[in-house]
Amino acid sequence: MFKYCGKIDDVELDVENNFLDGSEKRVVFGPGNGFSDFMAVRDFRIDPGVVSTPHTHPWAHCITGISGKGSFVIEGESAPIEPGRWCYVPGDLEHYFQNDGDEVFEFQCIVPPEGDVNPNKK
């Protein structure tokens, strides 16, 4: 593997901090992997039918659709997330995501380092 490039599939699964059954989580960029001081880029792959728990947190985050079909629900409004679509989630707004299709829904989520936590553990 080239030192500065690679495949997302080769990034180790983050089993310890994955907060959603029926999904895979990898931290593509973050502490110890290129962006230790200002962001973490996480890649999520969510199985069909999976819906996350509604939650809030103080940090904002950005979402980019990679494959499949899903949606983000922010303050009760649903926005489709598919390849080529993005979503900005301001801090302190209730939100959740779900897989709306019959294949794996993959998206990348960018958060500050303190945001790479399990929102279900408080």
Image (tube, grey):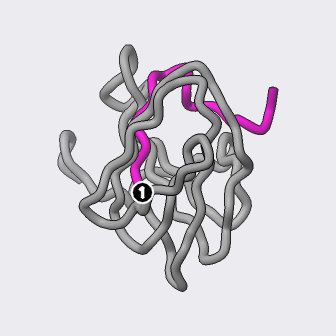
Q: Residue at x 63, y 25 (%)?
A: 57
Q: Which residue shows up at 52% across the image and 79% down it? A: 101
Q: Position of residue 112 (x, y in %)?
A: 45, 23
Name the residue that disc number 1 marks.
107
**Which residue is at the front of the view, 93 or 102?**
93
Q: Residue at x 59, y 47 (%)?
A: 14
Relative to the observer, which residue lies in front, 94 or 32?
Answer: 94
Q: Residue furthest bottom?
A: 102
Query: Relative to 7, does residue 91 appear above or below in the rendering?
Result: above
Splitting the image into 4 quarters, where does residue 47 fall?
A: bottom right
Query: In the image, residue 99 lies at what x, y percent?
Result: 56, 69
**Residue 26 place in picture, x, y as percent:** 49, 49
Please determine whether, in this image, residue 102 is positioned above or below residue 98. below
Amino acid on which disc 1 is placed: Phe
Residue located farthest toward the top when viewing the structure as drawn: 37
> Residue 120 lies in magenta, yes or no?
yes
The reply to whether the magenta stretch includes residue 113 is yes
Residue 23 placement (x, y as % from top left): 62, 62
Q: Quadrant of residue 46?
A: bottom right
Residue ID at (55%, 26%): 115
Q: Is residue 65 visible?
A: yes
The answer to whether 102 appears left or right of 119 in the picture is: left
- For the magenta stretch, what is the residue range? 107-122
Alpha-carbon neighbours of circle 1 within 10 Å: few (<14), some, or many (≥20)?
many
Mark 1, secondary structure of its residue: strand
The quarter of the displayed image where residue 102 is located: bottom right
